[in-house]
Image (cartoon, rainbow, N blue to C red):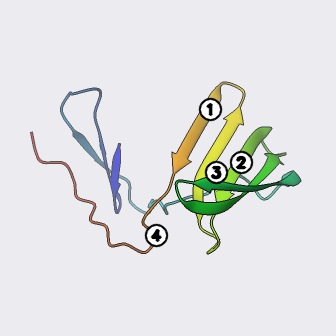
Amino acid sequence: TIWVGEARYTRDGDGPWKKETVPGLTLKFPARNWSDQQANVVDLGPARIGGTPVTVLAFLDRANGAYHRLWIDPANHILREQMHAPGHFMTRDYADYGAPVAIRPPPPP
């Protein structure tokens, strides 16, 4: 799935792209994956991602029971996020904060 403004482009596997317009719905990214009901926040201490020093924080989201871990650099940027919930596991890596980015719709079939 690719979001560009209010347009969503989706496809299954290598199938054709399908465009849908969702007026009024836009996505902010990166979007946080937790509610405002954090509990048991723990500072797990220093670590490194590549050559970058980070602080690792862990917490529970009481709204959905998911466990989160964040790797945060000295500028308070989240460089890595892990979320573990029943039946759902994910890891996101973030890089190039402040770098220009171009997001374009896929080419027509």
Mark 3 closeness class: few <14, some 14–19, many ≥20 residues within 10 Å = few
The mark nearer the N terminus, 1 or 4, is 1
* Labels 1, 3: front one: 1
The amino acid type found where label 1 is placed reads Phe
User: Percent position (x, y) of residue 71?
Assistant: 65, 55
* Labels 3, 4: front one: 4
- Which residue is labeled 2 in the image? 69
The mark nearer the N terminus, 2 or 4, is 2
How far is the residue under mark 3 from the one under mark 4? 18 Å
Mark 2 closeness class: few <14, some 14–19, many ≥20 residues within 10 Å = many
How far is the residue under mark 2 from the one under mark 1? 12 Å
Relative to residue 22, is residue 45 drawn left or right? Answer: right
How far is the residue under mark 1 from the one under mark 4? 24 Å
How far is the residue under mark 3 from the one under mark 2? 11 Å
Q: Nearer the viewer, residue 91 or 11?
A: 91
Residue at image position (57%, 41%) is 91
- Which residue is labeled 4 in the image? 97
Element marked by disc 4: loop
Element marked by disc 1: strand
The amino acid type found where label 3 is placed reads Asn
- In the displayed image of the protein, which residue is found farthest to the front? 51
Mark 4 closeness class: few <14, some 14–19, many ≥20 residues within 10 Å = few
Residue at image position (52%, 54%) is 50
The amino acid type found where label 2 is placed reads Arg
Q: Nearer the viewer, residue 56 or 107?
A: 56
Relative to residue 102, is residue 90 drawn left or right? Answer: right
The answer to whether the residues at label 3 and label 4 have Cβ atoms under 8 Å apart is no
* Labels 2, 1: front one: 2
